[in-house]
Amino acid sequence: MPDISDFAVRAKEFKLLVECKLDGAGVVGCHWIDPESGRFLRESPWVNVSTEGGAAFALDLPIAPGRYRFYISRRAEGGTWPYLTGGEFLAIDAHVCGDGAHVDRHEITTLGQLRRERWPGLVKEILLGPFAAIWQNRQLMQSMVRRDVLSRYRGSFADSFWAVLNPLLLMLTYYFVFGLFLKTKFPGDPSQAGFVLFFISGMLPWLAMNESLARAPYTALEHRNLITKVIFPMEVLPVNLTLAGLTTGLIATGIFLVILAVARGGIPVTALWLPVILIPQLFLTAGLCYLLATGGVYVRDLVYVTGLLLTMWFFMTPICYPEISLPAAMLPVLGKNPLYIIVRAYRAILIEGANPEWRAIGKLYALALVVFYGGFAVFHRARKGFADVL
C-alpha cells in the first residue's frame, strides 16, 4: 500500500497546488528534481500530518519556461526518505510557459518504475542523439567548418592555398629528418621513393586526428560567447573539429594519390576501401574530441597535457619508422593501438594493393563506437554546467 493516497494536483498561474493524505501520522516532504538528469535540486519545507489530516503544498514555480519534476514522499524516522530505497511516492511532472504552470503527469510510482520507463527513451537518445544533433544543425556545421578552415589562413599571402601547403610542408619536414638524415628504410622497398610512400601513407590519418584532438580541449573556451550568451547546440563543436581535421586529411590524401600515381604509374583498386577505414577513424576522433572538450572546460591544463600525449602517441606508432624497429615485447601492445591499426590499413590498401585485416578493422569499429558514444554521453551530461564554469 502506498504511504500517500487521495491526492489532488492542480496548477494556478505560476504555482503548483498539491493536496494529499498520509496513511497515518508523519512528515511529508517535496524534493525538486531535474527531469533530464535526475539530479536533486532543492527541498521544500516539510509538512506535519496528523492521523486525520492531510498535507498541502503550494510550490512557487520560476517564471522562466522549463520543465520541472517533484517527488512527494513520507519522511521516515532518522531523516531518511523511503522512496530512495524503493518505497512509493507521488511523482509530478509540470512545465512553465508564458501563461503559467501546467501539470503534465502525476502518479504514485517508485524510482525503479521511473527508471524502467526511461530506458527506451534513454537508449534512443544515446544511439540517435549525436546523429539527430548533426542532422538538425547540418547547415550551421557546414558554415562553421568552412569558416574554420578558411579563417586560419585568411590575410596571408597564399590565403586558402595554405590548406594544401601546410600538410605538404609538414610531411616534407618529417621526410628530411627521418628519410634523409636518419636514413630510415621500410622493408620491401628500401629506396627513397619507397620510404616517401610508406611514410606519407602513415601520416595521412595522423594529420586529420592530430589537428582535431589538439584543438579539442580549447573548443568550449574558444566559443564561450556562444555558450554563455545564446542558445547554442554545443554538441556540434567536437564534430566540427573532427570534420575540419578530416578536410586537412582529405587534402593530404589527394596530394598523396597524385604522388602515388606518378611514382608507380597508377593507384591500386584497393584504395576504394578507404571510406571503410575513414568511418571508424571519424567515430574514434569525434569520441575523443567529446571527452577532451569536456575535460578542457574543467581542467585548463589539459590543453598542454594533450599536446604532450599526442606527441607520445605519434612516436609510439610506427609512422616514421618500420614496426620491426620496435622490441619484440612491444608488438602485442602495438596491436592494441587504434592509430596503428588505421595506419596499417592505409598502407595495405594504398601501397601494398592488399585488403585491410578485417579482424583488426572489426575490433577498430567496436572500439570507435564505444569511444564515440561514451564521449558523447559524458559531454551531453556535463554540458549544462559549461556556462557556469566558462
Image (spheres, rainbow, N blue to C red):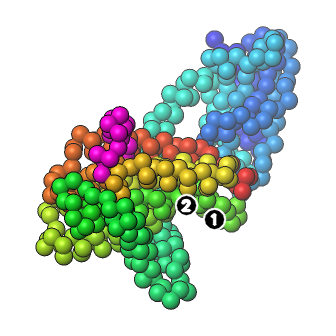
Magenta stretch holds residue 119 = no
Residue 263 found in image quarter: bottom left
Q: Residue at x 63, y 64 (%)?
A: 223
Q: Is residue 89 visible?
A: yes
Residue 222 tag number: 1
For label 2, count other residues whose C-alpha is less than 10 Å away and answer few (under 14), some (14-19) or many (20+). Answer: many
Magenta stretch holds residue 326 = yes
Secondary structure, mark 1, is: helix
Q: Is residue 314 left or right of residue 353?
A: right
Residue at image mark 2: 215
Q: Main secondary structure of the magenta part?
A: helix
Task: Evaluate if marks 2 and 1 touch, with contact meaning CB atoms under 8 Å apart.
Answer: yes
Q: Residue furthest bottom?
A: 157
* 76 relative to 369, above or below: above
x%, y% of residue 178? 37, 62
* 65 relative to 151, above or below: above
Which residues, given as a range, are shown in magenta?
Answer: 322-338
x%, y% of residue 69? 67, 37
Secondary structure, mark 2, is: helix
Q: Is residue 79 left or right of residue 387?
A: right
The amino acid type of the residue labelled 2 equals Arg
x%, y% of residue 23? 74, 12
Q: Is residue 75 left or right of residue 122?
A: right
| Distance of label 2 from label 1 (alpha carbons) | 10 Å
The amino acid type of the residue labelled 1 equals Glu
x%, y% of residue 123? 45, 38
Which quadrant of the figure contains the C terminus? Answer: bottom right
Q: Residue at x 53, y 86 (%)?
A: 156
For label 1, count other residues whose C-alpha is less than 10 Å away and answer few (under 14), some (14-19) or many (20+). Answer: few
